[in-house]
Amino acid sequence: MNDQDLGNVTSLIDVISFSKITLLVFGFIILAFAVKFVGSIGESLHRKIPSRRLLIAQIITTVSFIIYILGGGYLFYGVMQPPKELILAVSGTLAVALGLSLKDLIASVVAGVILLFDRPFQVGDRVTFDGIYGEISVIGLRAVRLVTLDDSVVTIPNSKFITDAVASGNFGALDMMIEINFHLALDSDLKKARSILYETATTSRFVFLKKPVTLVFSEVNFAERPAMQIRVKCYVIDVRFEKALQTDILTRGNDALIKANIARPSLLHGN
């Protein structure tokens, strides 16, 4: 070992002490509590200002990233106070070692920063990724947490979103288009059915009437026979009520079609 290497080892021993390590760990614990505190403020604001729920969630995510990255870097340098010579000597070796052993973690952290600024989706968005559909609840340093509609939490590494396609249903907006399908017999009164379903959609308490309600007709095969499909396209007032809107329109629309004696394919099956 030459004099330069010996000097680097001595400097490293001077930098790494029990008191500094203890202070560093304590500092990172404080950072974690700070992030949780910011998150609790966000939850409180969600309840007080529900119309700004997604904007608040996006701000909280950005603040959390800043606390972890800037706070962690400042804390490490301020506590350890490594000399510049030691930083230059050790940085290359650490970069290679960490790159090999933690390449997946580092890739996910870098991808998390990219997601924060490129914003292919945001916290609160309803997205479909690799066949999984749900709401983005957290964009963390390492992974994204997605809550499915059956309340399962799926954790996906950030790096996956950089290379694979992801579809966002609302892209930062509270409202989102919902499609509800009805099937009628070809010889049914389509004009009357259209009027019934349009009224059903526009009178739902979950529909966002500042955006259009449209009905699209197309002939399809249903129940092993030709049928007329009516796609009711409307916007839900808040993505949290997606299933509530679908259920409301389906149940009330079905009841109204039955009362109006509108023929359905299922009623004709077996004739």
Image (cartoon, grey):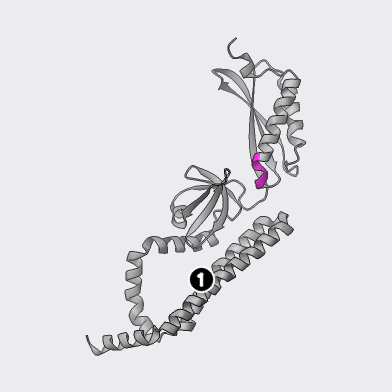
Residue at 47 percent across and 53 percent down: it is: 156
Foreground residue among 10 and 168: 10
On the image, which quarter does residue 250 sit in? top right
Region in magenta: 239-243
Residue at 75 percent across and 44 percent down: it is: 210
Q: Is residue 109 above or below residue 174?
A: below
The quarter of the rendered structure image containing the C terminus is: top right
Per the picture, the main secondary structure of the magenta-coloured stretch is: helix
Q: Is residue 30 left or right of residue 203?
A: left
Q: Secondary structure at mark 1?
A: helix
Q: Is residue 6 visible?
A: yes
The answer to if 241 sits in the magenta stretch is yes
From the image, tell me which residue sits under label 1. 69
| Mark 1 residue type | Ile
Q: Residues within 10 Å of mark 1 (few under 14, many from 20)?
A: few
Q: Position of residue 17 (x, y in %)?
A: 40, 84
Foreground residue among 252 and 184: 252
